[in-house]
Image (tube, rainbow, N blue to C red):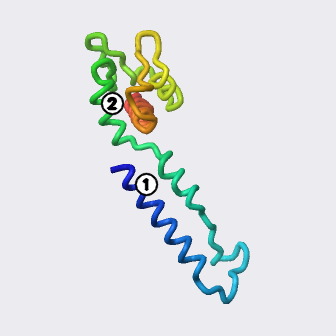
Amino acid sequence: MKLRSVLIAVTAATLAAVAFSCAPRNEEPPAGGPTAVRTVTVTETVMRTVARRDARAGRRVFQTVCARCHALKPGDWTGNRVNLTALQPTYETTVAKVTRGGIAMPSFSGKLSRRQIRDVAAFVSRTAARRAR
């Protein structure tokens, strides 16, 4: 589903670029004026789409993979679960821990895709910070 969205974005950007390059140019808009348009390359559009963090998808990953060892509710230390709300990890810290593992935490580098790791890190860092308030 995500790949389909990326392919649609690439196709749309390519078609727009072709249409723009084929359009007749009678006069150029003034530089920096109200009608000036910033040109975005296809590569730039694809990179923005691929690099976007999806916290909703991260929630699903958290519930299926992380929830048996981690909690995100304030004060929830039931069993052996580590409460991430109390720790409030940053996005970068979460990506590093999920990718490389930690003291008792295994590495999920080969088990989760880079996209899934980014998404779960976005979900954990946002949710932990919001619930700690």
In the image, what residue type sits under mark 2? Answer: Phe
Badge 2 is on which residue? 62
Secondary structure category for the residue under label 2: helix
Q: Quadrant of the C terminus?
A: top left
Residue 15 visible in the snapshot: yes
Residue at image coords 26%, 14%: 78
In which image quadrant can residue 4 be found?
Answer: bottom left
| Residue 125 point in image, percent of width and height | 44, 32
Image check: 14 left or right of 41?
left
Residue at image coords 63%, 78%: 35
Q: In front: 72, or 96? A: 96
Image check: 124 left or right of 96?
left
Q: Residues within 10 Å of mark 1 (few under 14, many from 20)?
A: some
Badge 1 is on which residue? 6
Please say if 117 is above or below 10: above
Q: Earlier in the sequence, mark 2 or mark 1?
A: 1
In which image quadrant can residue 32 be found?
Answer: bottom right
Image check: 40 left or right of 9?
right
Residue located farthest toward the right when viewing the structure as drawn: 31
